[in-house]
Image (tube, rainbow, N blue to C red):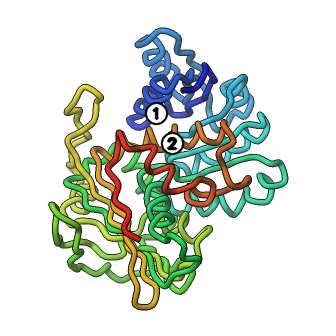
Amino acid sequence: MATGLKVAVFGAYGHTGRFVVAELRDRGFVPTLSGRDADKLNALAASEAGLDARPASVDDPASLDRALAGAAAVINCAGPFATTAAPVIEAALRAGIPYVDVAAEIEANVDTFAHFTERARAAGSVIVPAMAFYGGLGDLLTTAAMGDWTATDEAHIAYGLSSWHPTAGTRAAGAVSRQRRHGRRVCYTNGQLEYRHDDPPTLKWPFPEPMGPRSVIGEFTMADVVTVPSHLSIPEVRNYMTIEAAKDVTAPNAPLPAAADERGRSAQTFIVDVVVRHGGSEQRAVARGQDIYAVTAPLVVEAVDRILKGRTRTVGVASAGAIFDAPDFLRALSSHISLELCP
């Protein structure tokens, strides 16, 4: 349990940000609320005692400095991260505190590694991008599935979502990514990102029971293609998404996530099935849980807790699997996800 350490949350009033604020409080941290909309911040601060609202904008460095003053770390929950990540990282570097975000945008995560790796390492700072359901969880599962392997031929990360009602933030981030890609899709093959104009394949993926085999969109590429290859020697990293969820997230009239329990989680369930293959051998890791947005909160708060306690393996810009003990990290989330490791 944290002992009253302050953690700034940029984008605190967003859908995921609210889950993060609640998780921080549950873990004994003191969230400092920040973001662009002062009215929304003040309304959130008024909802519970002891919450401090500090409005800030990414185009006003001084406001970000004020928002981070006295904080032990900052969590960035405000997308599109193509716009917010760099300014908030700069503020964290000025403040000398760790930065963690929940970015699912592939290109934004590439930018973080490209632009801040050397500076963060030289400063002894910690920057962890994509510490979320997409990017973070897949990386931890892939790292755990590797076991003692130091390299492998392929990593397959299949997402079995019962549905996917996207938040406004997800839609905005997706629009920015599509614009940056000029309408192309992206995949990770032969050890690099490739952009393509063709349609992705449709195939069957053998999810474990009770889901069982399902039709999926192949090469439905997520942030795992940045996080996993950043530290693991795997030339082919492939994502898959159940067709029903893929249709949901692209539907123009898809509803927003709706609370279905006392914690505010939606009824959405998920299974993340990771298979790594080397030669004729195969190893697997599987995680199951509820609500991809809600589960991001324990992922990112556990990361901050471990960073502040020095339970890390490196400094600089690092993905979840590189900086943390992946099996131990995943087991620490046992109240939020069920885990199967089959190396």
Above or below for 323 versus 336? below
Which of these two is toward me, 67 or 168?
67
Q: At 31% across and 63% down in the image, what residue appears?
A: 159
Quadrant in the picture for the C terminus: bottom left
Marks 2 and 1 sit apart, C-alpha to C-alpha, by 8 Å
Above or below for 190 versus 62? below
Q: Position of residue 144 (x, y in %)?
A: 48, 63
Q: At 77% across and 52% down in the image, what residue appears?
A: 120
Reading the chain from its start, which is encountered first: label 2 or label 1? 1
Mark 2 residue crowding within 10 angstroms, few (<14) / some (14–19) / many (20+): many
The amino acid type found where label 2 is placed reads Val
Q: Position of residue 163 (x, y in %)?
A: 21, 53
Q: Which mark is residue 300?
A: 2
Image-quadrant location for residue 265? top left
Query: Do the CB atoms of the residues marked 2 and 1 lie less than 8 Å apart?
Result: yes
Image-quadrant location for residue 67? top right
| Residue furthest bottom as drawn | 279
Q: At 55% across and 30% down in the image, what residue appears?
A: 35
Which residue matches tag 1?
20
SS category of the residue bearing label 2: helix
**Horizontal side of residue 43 vs 335, given as left or right:** right
The amino acid type found where label 1 is placed reads Val
Q: How many marks?
A: 2
SS category of the residue bearing label 1: helix
